[in-house]
Amino acid sequence: EPEVTQTPSHQVTQMGQEVILRCVPISNHLYFYWYRQILGQKVEFLVSFYNNEISEKSEIFDDQFSVERPDGSNFTLKIRSTKLEDSAMYFCASGVRALNTEAFFGQGTRLTVV
Amino acid sequence: AQSVAQPEDQVNVAEGNPLTVKCTYSVSGNPYLFWYVQYPNRGLQFLLKYITGDNLVKGSYGFEAEFNKSQTSFHLKKPSALVSDSALYFCAVRDVRSGGYQKVTFGTGTKLQVIP
């Protein structure tokens, strides 16, 4: 069964450093998303991406964040200068269509900023 | 704005008993509703969805959910709980009227503990 894969599973970084989280969505999917889950809190939408551009983003997704689909298979989330409060589980998801379909989630990358 | 509420942080149920995990939502238009399950150290797994049609939706692992428009609820149910059902359950909603590309709002999650 096809699945969304994320690497690394755990990333530790120093505050102020740049970090890139990687995702390989399901191959025939067209819509891509990043969500995050701070420990013990709810899953929060960050950004959606379609047709090589951001289609929607939340207030969390500020100028420190960027997304890219550099080669048609990978989908990355970059945090330019990490802060302690960026520590969270980051989930990538993808979907076939936007409207009435579910998204398929990866297993997540646990980001720890020290 | 769309929102979803899961009023119970934790639900405990004995194995073999029926279970219900509650969810209520708020949208300005018609909702698309989803249930996801999260096992420890795992991502979110899709269980079921309501888009339109029959109010009773059947999903994976024997779970079902009932859409109730008048009560704006989408409770998750299973007739007979298994210990392996113990996990964190998330309800999610998307407002059809919101357009865009599927910003889904998740609830805070309900931890289901099935007691042997």
Image (spheres, coloured by chain):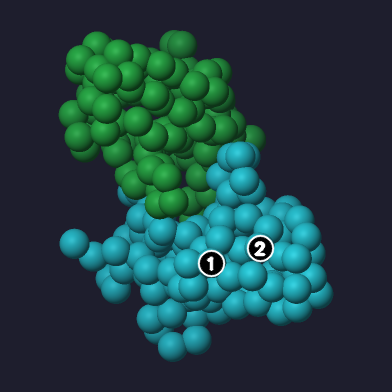
Q: Amino acid at mark 2?
A: Thr
Give the x, y percent position of residue B21. 40, 20
Same chain, labels 1 and 2: yes
Q: Residue at x 62, y 46 (%)?
A: A39
Q: Identify the secondary structure beneath mark 1.
A: strand
Q: Residue at x 76, y 56 (%)?
A: A85
Give the x, y percent position of residue B49. 32, 36
Could you tell whether A112 is left or right of A105 in the image? right
Please report, as a chain letter, where disc 1 is located.
Answer: A
Relative vertical location of residue B56 with respect to residue A50 in this rendering, above or below: above
Residue on which disc 1 sits? A10
Q: Are marks 1 and 2 in contact (CB under 8 Å)?
A: yes
Give the x, y percent position of residue A29. 33, 67
Please report, as a chain letter, where disc 2 is located.
Answer: A
Neighbour class for label 1 at 10 Å: few (<14), some, many (≥20)?
some
Q: Identify the secondary structure beneath mark 2.
A: strand
Q: Which chain is cyan?
A: A
* In the foreground, B91 or A52: B91
Q: Which chain is green?
A: B
Q: Amino acid at mark 1?
A: His
Q: For residue A93, what is the image quadrant?
A: bottom left
Residue on which disc 2 sits? A112
Could you tell whether B46 is left or right of A110 in the image? left
